[in-house]
Amino acid sequence: MKSYIEERAMDIAKYIVENNATVRQTAKKFGISKSTVHKDVTERLTQINPSLAQKARKVLDVNKSERHIRGGLATREKYLHQQHL
């Protein structure tokens, strides 16, 4: 694996853990695709730094379990905003 990929995977995981960030937020911050973020954290990072990979994975699992709630809140906000127009 190339060194810049290893470094990117480490930076991504640190960002996710420190900011409790979602895959989408992380992808936007680093200018890469969501699938690249996911692959870096779940596959590449486990070979480089397993403990950091596990911490990042916990954050992503929590975010995944809560996404239906965030989606519902976003829809609610959308319709509340439309009623005030």
Image (spheres, rainbow, N blue to C red):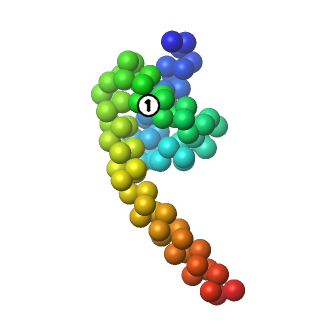
- The x, y position of residue 6, in whole percent, is 49, 19
Q: Is residue 80 above or below residue 6?
A: below
Nearest the viewer among 58 and 52 is 58
Q: Is residue 12 at least partly visible in the picture? A: no
Residue 55 quadrant: top left
Given the current orientation, which residue lies at the most extreme bottom position? 84
Residue at 36% x, 23% y is 46
Q: Is residue 7 above or below residue 76?
A: above
- The x, y position of residue 84, in whole percent, is 64, 87
Q: Quadrant of the C terminus?
A: bottom right
Residue at 62% x, 35% y is 32
Residue 67 quadrant: bottom left
Packing grade of label 1 (10 A; few <14, some 14-19, many >=20) is many
Residue at 55% x, 12% y is 2
Q: Is residue 52 above or below residue 48?
A: below
Residue at 37% x, 37% y is 56
Q: Is residue 25 at least partly visible in the picture? A: yes
Residue 63 as seen in the image, left or right of residue 25: left
Given the current orientation, which residue lies at the most extreme right position? 85
- The x, y position of residue 33, in whole percent, is 60, 37
Q: Is residue 37 above or below residue 25?
A: above
Residue 39 as seen in the image, left or right of residue 30: left
- The x, y position of residue 38, in whole percent, is 48, 35
Residue 29 as seen in the image, left or right of residue 85: left
- Residue that label 1 marks: 41
Q: Look at the numbered disc 1 and give the secondary structure of its residue.
A: helix
Which residue type carries mark 1? Val
